[in-house]
Image (spheres, rainbow, N blue to C red):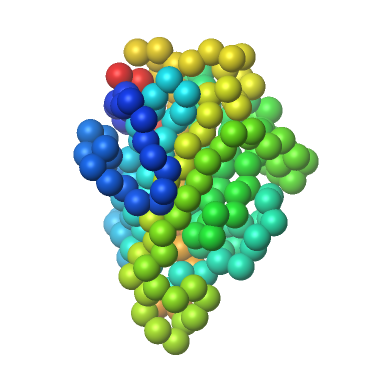
């Protein structure tokens, strides 16, 4: 299957405060799909990416009627609650890649995987930490209370290029292509199954680590 391409535009700087303000208007919007079926998720999500000389920026806006997050320790199993995820591979012909997860309360899970087979040792891979990572969120609702209806949570993330060992201290240049996709786990009392998985990639299997279905991230 032909890879879908996302054009990542350069900006001067993003203020990471959890609110997707005017500077994000330059970025193209990404939609999310349920793996295999490709249908639209019940919980709408949108996301965008930008970059400057130091950081890759990712912004998510997550409609959410039941916001859930209690883990506070880094590298907790954040995928068991509401979370957004960022998967990055800084070159098509290299093996290692990165998985980042971010909760509504800014809890981070970050892992450096030598190859997909190491997924079974994910907590060993998570001993790596991305130094200089920035994240801020905004919650519009009542956290961990299913008795009312929440509205949304948004998040801004800044991943430092110097924190990614596969780049060896270099910055992406115009025309460079990475592989990536963004994903979301939504846990909610309002969902029929209680949980919904979605991604910006058109996954043909229910496996966010299936590299064949990842997208291109092309730096503009």
Residue found at x 61% / y 19% = 166
Q: Quadrant of the N terminus?
A: top left
Please say whether residue 101 is visible from this viewpoint. Answer: yes
Find residue 137 and report its image quarter.
bottom left
Q: Horizontal placement of 150 versus 23: left or right?
A: right
Name the residue rendered at 38%, 56% in the picture.
154
Quadrant of the rendered structure where residue 5 is? top left
Compared across the picture, whether 179 is left or right of 9 comes to right
Q: Position of residue 160 (x, y in %)?
A: 53, 29
Report whether residue 209 is seen: no
Classify 114 as above or below 187.
above
From the viewer's perspective, is residue 121 above or below residue 5? below
How many marks do you count on the picture?
0
Residue occupying the point 47% across, 50% down:
136
Which of the image's four quarters has the C terminus?
top left
> Can you give x and y, in whole percent of width and height, for residue 113 in the image?
66, 33
**Image location of residue 195, percent across then percent down:** 48, 67
Horizontal placement of 167 versus 219: left or right?
right
Question: 121 or 38, which lies in front?
Answer: 121
Q: Nearer the viewer, residue 40 or 45?
A: 45
46 to 134, vertically: above or below: below
Percent position of residue 84, x then y: 48, 52
The extreme bottom residue here reads 147
Displayed quadrant of residue 149: bottom left
Q: Residue at x 46, y 63 (%)?
A: 186
Return the residue nearer the eye: 55 or 4: 55
């Amino acid at each position: 299957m032909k890879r879908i391409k996302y054009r990542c535009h350069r900006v001067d700087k993003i203020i990471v405060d959890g609110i997707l303000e005017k500077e994000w208007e330059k970025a193209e919007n990404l939609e999310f799909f349920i793996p295999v079926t490709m249908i639209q998720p019940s919980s709408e999500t949108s996301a965008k990416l930008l970059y400057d000389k130091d950081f890759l920026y990712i912004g998510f806006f997550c409609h959410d009627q039941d916001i859930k997050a209690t883990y506070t320790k880094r590298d907790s199993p954040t995928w068991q609650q509401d979370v957004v995820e960022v998967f990055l591979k800084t070159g098509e012909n290299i093996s290692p890649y990165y998985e980042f997860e971010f909760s509504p309360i800014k809890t981070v899970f970050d892992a450096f995987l030598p190859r997909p087979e190491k997924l079974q040792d994910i907590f060993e891979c998570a001993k790596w930490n991305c130094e200089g990572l920035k994240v801020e969120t905004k919650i519009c609702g009542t956290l961990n209370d299913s008795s009312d209806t929440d509205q949304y949570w948004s998040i801004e993330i800044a991943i430092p290029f110097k924190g990614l060992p596969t780049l060896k201290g270099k910055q992406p240049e115009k025309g460079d292509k990475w592989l990536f996709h963004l994903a979301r786990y939504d846990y909610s009392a309002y969902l029929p199954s209680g949980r919904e998985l979605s991604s910006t990639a058109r996954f043909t299997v229910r496996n966010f680590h299936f590299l064949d279905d990842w997208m291109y991230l092309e730096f503009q």
